[in-house]
Image: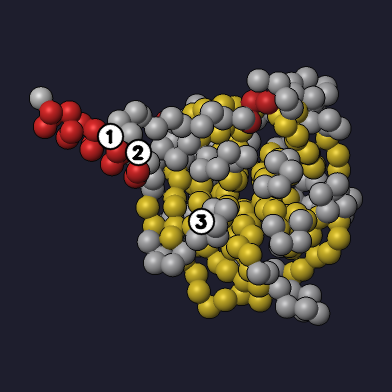
Amino acid sequence: MRTTLTASVAAAALLAATGCSDKPVETPAGTIHRYYTPNGRARIPGLRNSSGMTFDTDAGTLFIVQDSPPLLRKISTDGKLLASWKINDVDDIEGVAYLGNGRFAIAEESSGKIRFFHLEPGNPAVVFDAKAIQVAPPTHDNTGIEGICASPDGKKLYVVEEKTPKKLYEIDLDSGKIRSPWYLETLDIGDASGISPAPVEGHLLILSQESRKIIECDSKGVVLASLSLEKKRNGLGNKPVDKPEGVALDPKTKKIYICGEPDMFYIFEPTNAK
């Protein structure tokens, strides 16, 4: 009996020392359902055909990519156009991700590639790296890769394929390895038009233009919360979010930004409601 008790005490001490437990690890709850927009919709004068959005964690500003003509637009967090850069030699840009230290990645739908670039002082155009990653097959039916975001540590990219099939890709930027961690087809959305880190660490936000909502998922694809972008919901007035194409998170303030075609801009803030 003494030997058994001693072994049990030792095992318990080992578990306590290593932080291990036989209790299941609980997934943090989602929070996106608590968001609302205090000001509704706004327009960004001069913006056309917005197709993706990202948050610059170094400067605290937003960047939007637009197609026709292809441009990179720097936007303040209150929706003012600050600067623009030409994006040459691209076709059908559908997403942008800030990687840190002035580097970006864009999703090019028609080629199925992720291309990388940086901004040079005084240069009116972006400068592409030689490196590119083939993520999905080329397409010309507007159903290919649509949204892109970087993980908070900048080590991974997440890319969504719009439909037929809806698909999520995870890219390890060190090794170049590409995998699909879970299936977007399981989500109750018509398409996937954008992606962003969620306010809760380890979660992702999936934006759907057709379904006009944001889905919050954990690392296994389990749906934890959702936010409707329909009219008269969550602070929106008599009009819904117009053709939502991009979503971005400010990790400090936890505000969520959405851009919609052609020049729409929305700010969503967390509430204290549970």
Query: Residue 96, position in %: x, y?
Result: 63, 57
Question: What amino acid does circle 2 point to?
Answer: Ala
Q: Which tag, 2 or 3, sits closer to the chain's start?
A: 2
Query: Residue 182, position in %: x, y?
Result: 39, 40
Q: Is residue 10 visible?
A: yes
The residue singled out by tag 3 in the image is 157
Question: What amino acid does circle 3 point to?
Answer: Leu
The residue singled out by tag 2 in the image is 16
Give the quarter of the figure containing the C terminus. Answer: top right
Task: Please give the name of the residue rendered at 49% of the width and 57% of the height, measured from the top-left corner.
Answer: 156
Q: Indicate the quadrant where residue 91 lies.
A: bottom right
Q: Distance of mark 3 from mark 1, alpha carbons? A: 40 Å
Give the quarter of the figure containing the N terminus. Answer: top left
Query: Residue 125, position in %: x, y?
Result: 74, 74
Which dot, 3 or 1, sits closer to the camera?
A: 1
Dot 3 falls on a residue whose secondary structure is strand
Q: Residues within 10 Å of mark 1 (few under 14, many from 20)?
A: few
Q: How is the image coloured?
A: secondary structure
Whether pointer 1 and pointer 2 mark residues with C-beta atoms closer than 8 Å, the reply is yes
Q: Distance of mark 2 from mark 3, alpha carbons? A: 35 Å
Dot 2 falls on a residue whose secondary structure is helix
The residue singled out by tag 1 in the image is 12
Task: Please give the name of the residue rendered at 56% of the width and 49% of the height, measured from the top-left corner.
Answer: 146
Residue 176 sits above or below residue 46 on the image: below
Q: Residues within 10 Å of mark 3 (few under 14, many from 20)?
A: many
